Image (tube, rainbow, N blue to C red):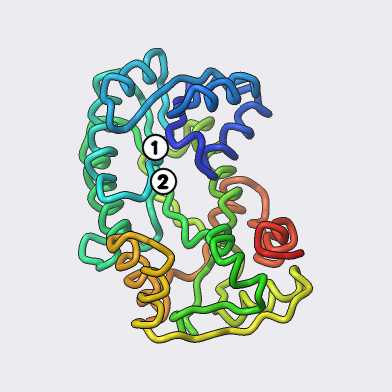
Amino acid sequence: MILVTGATGNIGRELCQLLVQDNVPARAMCRQEEQVATYRQMGLQAVIGDFDDPESLRQAMQECDRLFLLSPTDPQQVQWEKQTIDLALEAGIQHIVKVSAADSNLTTRVPWARAHAEIDHYLRSKPIGWTILRPSGFMQNFIESAMALSMGVMPHIMGDGQTSYIDLRDVALVARHVLTEDTHHGAIYYLTGPESLSTGDVVAHLSVALELPIRETPLSVDQMHRAMMASELSDWLSNALLAQYAVIAGGYSIDTTGEVKRLTGQEPRTFAEFAQMYKYDLGAI
């Protein structure tokens, strides 16, 4: 039995659908009763569980032998995931598949990349089977810019920096293979899309998909920070995003890899394919 944490998020939801399609016994951990009902209707087991409630995690892990570990991006992420790893050991879980980050690094200024690095080291030190997935930036993150895109602009501070964006559906597909095959213990996989793209490249793809001329709008760091604060993002998240954008602008993102094709037998989705599929979420009228 596979326990899927983060089941109601984008990657977790897609993973659950794949497991149902393959008739793989799985249990979705949800935070609300309505979500439990939805996942049970899909054909999964589903339970209430919360990273802030260790006892709920213990209950969720009963009779499970594999764990998909994905928690929200949050200042408490290290505490949540280390505790979950400890509880998995107590519960007899045999294999943990953790979603990390491609830029995972203990010395980075990007908080979630630093958090993932700390958790990765912790997981690798434990007497348990593990696999770590390190995806690059998600294509779906551009949906958060839908309002600006619908007005024909793409504000950014990433200069000409490129990122090998990945469709989160491909991350879920890799996770499904890793969770259901016995050949991935002790592996770290860097997952990317098929091409490295600058913001200019992204804007070109979005203009075609949305059938709308979209213009790059470079901002200063200060202008971007003020815009974030105006949209009521927390100080923590605003500063974290600025640090992430600086990494991209500096050209420090990873190159493309062939891991998605190697692990799944399928080519990773292109940004053009993503943009066409999600065009209405991205601001198309």
Crowdedness of circle 1 by 10 Å Cα count: few (<14), some, many (20+)?
many
Residue 93 locus on image (x, y percent):
34, 23
Q: Is residue 166 above or below residue 212?
A: above
Compared across the picture, whether 207 is left or right of 104 comes to right
Residue hosting label 2: 99
Number of labels in the image equals 2
Image-quadrant location for residue 38? top right
For the residue labelled by badge 1, is the local secondary structure a helix, a strand or a loop? strand
The residue at 36%/77% (across/down) is: 246
The residue at 61%/45% (across/down) is: 264
Residue 188 locus on image (x, y percent):
39, 49
Which residue reaches farthest top?
63
Crowdedness of circle 2 by 10 Å Cα count: few (<14), some, many (20+)?
many
Q: What residue type is labelled 2?
A: Val
Image-quadrant location for residue 113? bottom left
Residue 258 locus on image (x, y percent):
56, 60
Q: In this view, does 25 lie above or below 193?
A: above
Compared across the picture, whether 275 is left or right of 98 comes to right
Mark number, residue 247: none
Question: Which quadrant would the C terminus be assigned to in this image?
Answer: bottom right
Compared across the picture, whether 2 is left or right of 222 comes to right
Q: Is residue 13 above or below residue 21?
A: below
For the residue labelled by badge 2, is the local secondary structure a helix, a strand or a loop? strand
Residue 127 locus on image (x, y percent):
24, 31
Q: For marks 2 and 1, give the CA distance.
A: 6 Å
The residue at 63%/34% (across/down) is: 18
The residue at 63%/72% (across/down) is: 149
Q: Are marks 2 and 1 in contact (CB under 8 Å)?
A: yes
Q: What residue type is labelled 1?
A: Leu
Residue hosting label 1: 69
